[in-house]
Image: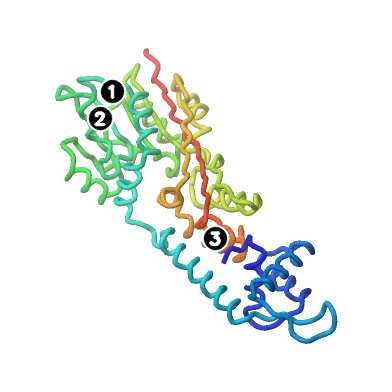
């Protein structure tokens, strides 16, 4: 059902039986949280009557009840079925496997773009020791290995044993299961540290940055890519619904939602010299691609459970996203910092 379409709202309101005009608008308000304007309601009723989708019963003046015709009920059923089919086809309902999720994201154009910016910022060179914090299934270890050549060494680090096993099985780089808050590595031992979307999930970001400072050699470089989820924008005709949805994601889903903007300050407080901050904005114009990143239906259901959206608003939100046109954007920051030389 296109809940932003006045005619479909009227048909839905009449699904349970005849109503007069005022009661139709009351039913619409219960569903969507808002009434149709008098002109919108009158226009919708006139158009539906002309199409043969509704009919007026006997009654007194404006209080004549309105019912669905057989064609009207068939239209409503067809529309509801189409929406269910579209939603099922477009939106994931099950949380994907973590390894598959990381590999799938890495294959998208948006992620490839910022990963290249991050690789350029790292400036890994032949013969260096490079640490890839939160290496996941090893998606980026081969590119790092090529950068340091056979003279250097790449060490992927992840705390998840499944990720470590996958990375070790698919790359020639060394892989270590460890906690980046407390690494089993000597001080001043690494030339480069790369981390991609890890800090947003960490329990103690300052402690992890202090550990990076300890492990890096003087003059060593840290290159970090982190999103700022407060910059997430999803287009929807009702700005309040869109803002509630993005606010829920930032408030409840991500542990450190604005770490991207905080990085220059936190790095400075940890003893680093910040060399560059490069914002990279990803633009999604295809709903399936955005769903891979945002889990649109899953997080809409969570927003309802958390009280950020009503069930009717959630339906309206997903309905619009499913039918398009679609646009969502989010900005990630690539920050480059160095440990001062002694």
Residue 330 in picture, x, y percent from top left: 50, 40
Q: Residues within 10 Å of mark 1 (few under 14, many from 20)?
A: many
Q: Which residue is mark 2?
A: 144
Label 2: element kind: helix
Closest to the camera, between mark 3 and mark 2, is 3
Label 1: element kind: loop
Which residue is more in the foreground, 333 or 284?
284
Q: Residues within 10 Å of mark 3 (few under 14, many from 20)?
A: some
Q: What distance separates the C-alpha of mark 3 from that of mark 2? A: 42 Å
Q: Residues within 10 Å of mark 2 (few under 14, many from 20)?
A: many
- Asked if disc 1 and disc 2 are in contact, CB closer than 8 Å, the reply is yes
Q: What distance separates the C-alpha of mark 1 from that of mark 2? A: 7 Å
Vertical side of 3 occupied by 199: above or below: above
Give left or right: position of 95 versus 51. left
Task: Report the residue at 25% width, 41% height from top.
Answer: 138
Vertical side of 288 occupied by 312: above or below: below
Classify the position of the N terminus by image quarter: bottom right
- Asked if disc 3 and disc 2 are in contact, CB closer than 8 Å, the reply is no
Classify the position of the C terminus by image quarter: top left
Label 3: element kind: helix
**Residue farthest to the top, as pictured:** 342
Q: Which residue is mark 3?
A: 319
Which residue is more in the foreground, 48 or 126?
48
Closest to the camera, between mark 1 and mark 3, is 3
Q: Which mark is residue 124?
A: 1
């Amino acid at each position: 059902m296109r809940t932003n379409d006045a005619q479909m709202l009227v048909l839905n309101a009449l699904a349970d039986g005849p109503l007069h005009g005022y009661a139709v608008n009351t039913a619409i308000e219960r569903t969507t949280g808002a009434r149709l304007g008098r002109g919108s309601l009158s226009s919708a009723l006139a158009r539906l009557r002309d199409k043969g989708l509704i009919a007026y019963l006997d009654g007194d003046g404006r209080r004549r009840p309105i019912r669905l015709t057989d064609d009207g009920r068939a239209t409503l059923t067809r529309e509801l079925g189409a929406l269910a089919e579209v939603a099922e086809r477009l939106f994931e309902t099950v949380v994907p496997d973590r390894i598959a999720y990381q590999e799938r994201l890495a294959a998208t154009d948006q992620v490839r773009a910022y990963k290249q910016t991050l690789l350029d910022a790292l400036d890994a060179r032949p013969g260096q020791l490079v640490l890839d914090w939160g290496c996941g299934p090893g998606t980026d270890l081969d590119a790092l290995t090529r950068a340091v050549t056979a003279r250097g060494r790449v060490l992927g680090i992840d705390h998840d044993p499944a990720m470590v096993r996958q990375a070790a099985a698919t790359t020639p780089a060394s892989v270590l299961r460890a906690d980046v808050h407390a690494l089993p590595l000597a001080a001043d031992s690494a030339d480069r540290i790369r981390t991609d979307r890890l800090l947003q999930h960490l329990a103690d970001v300052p402690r992890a940055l202090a550990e990076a400072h300890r492990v890096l050699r003087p003059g060593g470089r840290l290159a970090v890519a982190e999103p700022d989820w407060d910059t997430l924008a999803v287009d929807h005709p009702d700005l309040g619904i869109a803002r509630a949805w993005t606010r829920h994601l930032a408030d409840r889903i991500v542990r450190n939602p604005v770490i991207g903007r905080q990085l220059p300050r936190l790095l400075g407080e940890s003893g680093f010299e910040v060399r560059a901050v490069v914002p990279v904005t990803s633009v999604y114009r295809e709903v399936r691609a955005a769903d891979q990143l945002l889990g649109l239906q899953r997080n809409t259901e969570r927003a309802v459970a958390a009280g950020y959206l009503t069930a009717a608003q959630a339906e309206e939100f997903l309905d619009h996203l499913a039918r398009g046109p679609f646009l969502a954007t989010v900005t990630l920051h690539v920050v480059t910092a160095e440990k001062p030389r002694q």
